[in-house]
Image: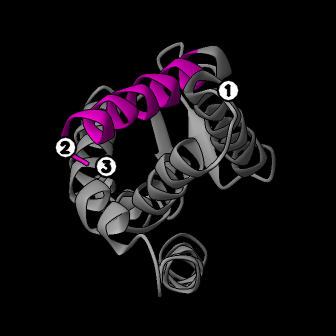
Amino acid sequence: MTEVIYMRVNILYFFFIPWILATLLFRKKNKMILYKITPFATVIATILCVWGDRHHFWVLKPVLKKNQVLTTMPLNLGLYPVFSSIMVYLIRKTKESASSWILVFTCFTTILEFIMKWIGRAAYGNDWNLNKTFISYFIPYYLIHKYSQWFL
């Protein structure tokens, strides 16, 4: 039963709340950012999560016997694409450098994961640590920024 509760919490916090935020932020202007960034960010996030799951680098509660990667789907379809879209929006609309925003979003996402680990909702394995987590967020955010330069 607790697995169901954990998954509902994942869906609420990592899928619904980010998409409500995205709907409010992008409802009138800049919808194209959301439309173009979301598919690319989702693919990158899913590839990275499948890779990490396959190598047992991390696990997010609930722990499933099969298809553990399903627990990260709310993140792959919600939090990561929404954060990526917001990052691209801020890069385009503010005077701050792209590097600064990539670093801010990388740090923020790493801190969120640290909090999840600290409260026991996530665990690391096979020598995975926060430094590697930082890099695993930095590279996708950088790729998403480059993608936005090429296709937006």
Principal secondary structure, stretch drawn in magenta: helix
Q: Disc count in the image? A: 3
Pick the residue in front: 17 or 39: 39
Mark positioned earlier in the residue sequence (2 or 1) = 1
One can see residue 94 in this view: yes
Pick the residue in front: 86 or 30: 30
Residues packed near mark 2 inside 10 Å, few (<14), some (14 to 19) or many (20 plus):
few
Instruction: Give the amino acid at mark 3.
Output: Ala
- The location of residue 1, given as percent across then percent down, is 53, 86
Q: Is 142 contained in the magenta span?
A: yes
Q: Which residue is label 2 attached to?
A: 151
Cβ–Cβ below 8 Å for labels 3 and 1? Answer: no
- The location of residue 64, given as percent across then percent down, is 36, 61
| Kind of element beneath mark 1 | helix
- Indicate the quadrant where residue 73 lies: bottom left
Q: Nearer the viewer, mark 3 or mark 2?
A: 2
Is 95 above or below relative to 43? above
Start and end of the magenta stretch? 132-152
Pick the residue in front: 83 or 115: 83
Cβ–Cβ below 8 Å for labels 3 and 2? Answer: no
| Kind of element beneath mark 2 | helix
Cβ–Cβ below 8 Å for labels 2 and 1? Answer: no
Q: Which residue is label 3 attached to?
A: 41
Q: Which residue is label 1 attached to?
A: 100
Give the residue drawn at x 30%, y 25%: 55
Estimate the spatial distance between the alpha carbons at disc 3 and disc 1, rounded to whole Å: 19 Å
Is 31 above or below relative to 137? below
- The location of residue 4, given as percent across then percent down, is 49, 84
Instruction: Give the amino acid at mark 1.
Output: Ser
Give the residue drawn at x 42%, y 26%: 142
| Kind of element beneath mark 3 | helix
